[in-house]
Amino acid sequence: MSKITEAVWEFAEPVVKDCGCEIWDIEYVREAGSWYLRLYIDKDGGVSIDDCERVSRALDPVLDEKDPISESYIFEVSSAGAERPLKRPSDFEKFMGSLVEVKLYRAKDGKKEYVGVLCGYDGGNVEIDAGGNRIGFEKNEIANVRLRIG
């Protein structure tokens, strides 16, 4: 996580909680010549457009006051999504036993994508059960892991 996203997380977390949600992730990225600060939120029962709007309106004045970013940027708040990426150890703990998709940097046994039930996580290493076949992946092999619907 960058210093900017860490700083934003720190002061945004209580505001997001007051809105009845939790922070899933924060990105600060450059796309098509513009900088974007994206806040992904989650809550039990799912996130609505009203939740995103409420969090955005509550955080706007705080971002203006704290001013963590010197250049101009576009601020967006959205749902983490049903097929969200798993990044932190707490993400893997929360979704242990869920269907996931693991994408690799390089093919392993002729494949770069694996789908299975998340059955293990240890320091970035991931294990899935793909139809009764347990497959382990080292942290340095994994490009990303995300929840998979159906």
Image (cartoon, helix red, strand yellow):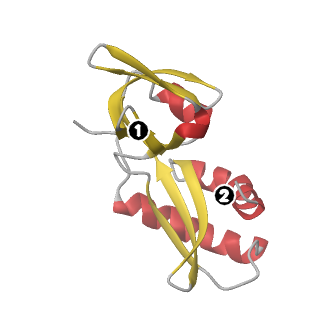
Residue 44, labelled with which disc? 1
Q: Secondary structure at mark 2?
A: helix
- Quarter in which the C terminus is drawn: top left
Q: Is residue 31 visible?
A: yes
Rendered residue at 44%/51% (across/down):
80
Instruction: Give the image location of residue 124, x and y in percent.
Output: 61, 32
Rendered residue at 69%/72% (across/down):
63
Determine whether 148 is above or below 118 in the image.
below
Instruction: Give the image location of residue 83, x and y in percent.
Output: 35, 46
Rendered residue at 78%/60% (across/down):
3
Quadrant in which residue 134 is drawn: top left
Observer-nearest residue: 132 or 16?
132
Instruction: Give the Cα separation between the discs numbered 2 and 1.
Output: 19 Å
Rendered residue at 59%/70% (across/down):
29
Q: Secondary structure at mark 1?
A: loop
The residue lying furthest to the front in this view is: 110
Observer-nearest residue: 72 or 33?
33
Q: Amino acid at mark 2?
A: Ala
The residue lying furthest to the top in this view is: 132
